[in-house]
Image (cartoon, rainbow, N blue to C red):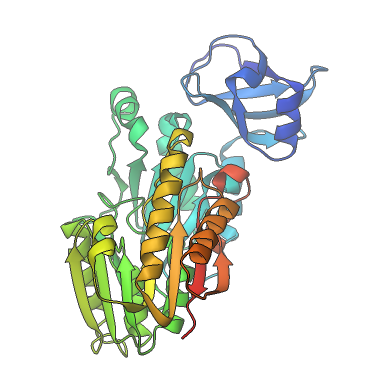
Amino acid sequence: MSSRARLKIRLTPAAEKAARGGHPWIYGDRIRSINRDGEAGELAVIYDRRDRFFGFGLYDPHSPIRLRMLHVGEPVTPDHNWWVERFRSATSRRTGLFDAQTTGYRWINGESDGLPGLVLDRYSDACVLKIYSAIWLGRIEEIQSWVRAACDPEPQALVLRLSRNLAAAAEDGYGLRDGDVLHGDVGSGVVTFLENGKRFEADLLNGQKTGFFLDQRENRQRIGEIAAGKDVLNVFSHSGGFSVYAAAGGARSATDVDISAHALAGAERNMAANAKLSGVAECRHETVKADAFGWMEEVAERFDVVIVDPPSLARRQSEVAAALAAYRKLARAGLNLVRPGGTLLAASCSAHVSAPEFFTLVREVARRSGRRWDEIETRLHAPDHEARIPEAHYLKAIYLRIPS
């Protein structure tokens, strides 16, 4: 970082109020004054209207979120011990959530753990560090030391994953690339971990997110609890996590539908890896490579359990209207595929579509379907993915039952 005088910032009253309330994002138009130009990732000290210490955060002149707060309150020194304690505070929140039968989970969840733009996921002996903001790019070596000091057990390998918008800046400015192995050895990058006693593979170097969709663990478990003797359809199946749980729960059949042949091959491997579990070998497993939207409209077969869990359909606010139309279409098609006595699980991971908005949409589709239906439950984030600011709320799921 620069050896110039410390970067000093003053905020608008509205920004001070939001920061005191725990929100870490400060947009450019909420900065009242700054003493000089700042560099990406530079530590900035914030002073209040009376020139008293207010807090500090990491600055990014190239982002609309100009400052990401790390601390508000009495002065503290952000030395190595402070950072280790911040990382350890996050990882310790997961203590007791999982036993030895689950070795894949989120250890640090960005803004919600006081480390904005930074995610750390555990996959057995390896970890994936995913960076969503340029503020961290100049601190990768330090982060490695903080992770190794804070995590128990200490990771034997650490992989770096980068948000797409950071690729150029990371390589040009720091020589970093998505999929870099920061320490240890992960071989081909595909590792095996446990989730409630079930074996799954995660592609740490090239897989979506950090290698697996850890956030749907509880919903997978719920499907396993209701799948006995059922024919299960898993749309947008990716690597077949829901189907493995359904098979282990005694499902008669599980059908995975995805447009990616690579993902479906992973689903077959995950099913095979769990063949020794009661029920899995007896479950008839089928994979279908198809565009889910069109396939759901054309298929004639009906199922006892239908899971519709698409990727994010609204990555920015301008895409919300189209996303809502797509969710409406998917909910309608999903309901049409449920046999009497069956269950629909409709899920969304689009942060720009709120949970009330999504649930209302699915209920409206159900009302207009002409079928009788009962709402079983709604669910939000898994405990290791706790969301502590509004913008971190992205995952939601609703279960509807169609009476016989």
- The x and y percentages for residue 59 are 54, 24
Which residue extends farthest front? Answer: 370
Left/right placement of residue 212 relative to residue 113 reads left
Q: Is residue 324 above or below residue 294?
A: above
- The x and y percentages for residue 111 are 57, 43
Residue 75 appearing in the image = no
Which residue extends farthest top? Answer: 36
- The x and y percentages for residue 66 are 55, 23
Q: Is residue 39 above or below residue 219?
A: above
Q: Is residue 268 above or below residue 94?
A: below
Residue shown at 83% from the left, 17% from the top: 50
Residue 40 appearing in the image = yes
- The x and y percentages for residue 128 are 37, 51
Residue shown at 47% from the left, 73% from the top: 371
Residue shown at 28% from the left, 36% from the top: 177
Out of 253 and 265, give the one closest to the viewer. 253
Left/right placement of residue 292 relative to residue 217 reads left
Marks counted in the figure total 0
Out of 12 and 238, give the one closest to the viewer. 238
Residue shown at 47% from the left, 76% from the top: 222
- Residue 94, located in which quarter of the rendered image? bottom right
Which residue extends farthest right? Answer: 50
Out of 362 and 172, give the one closest to the viewer. 362
Out of 135 and 379, give the one closest to the viewer. 379
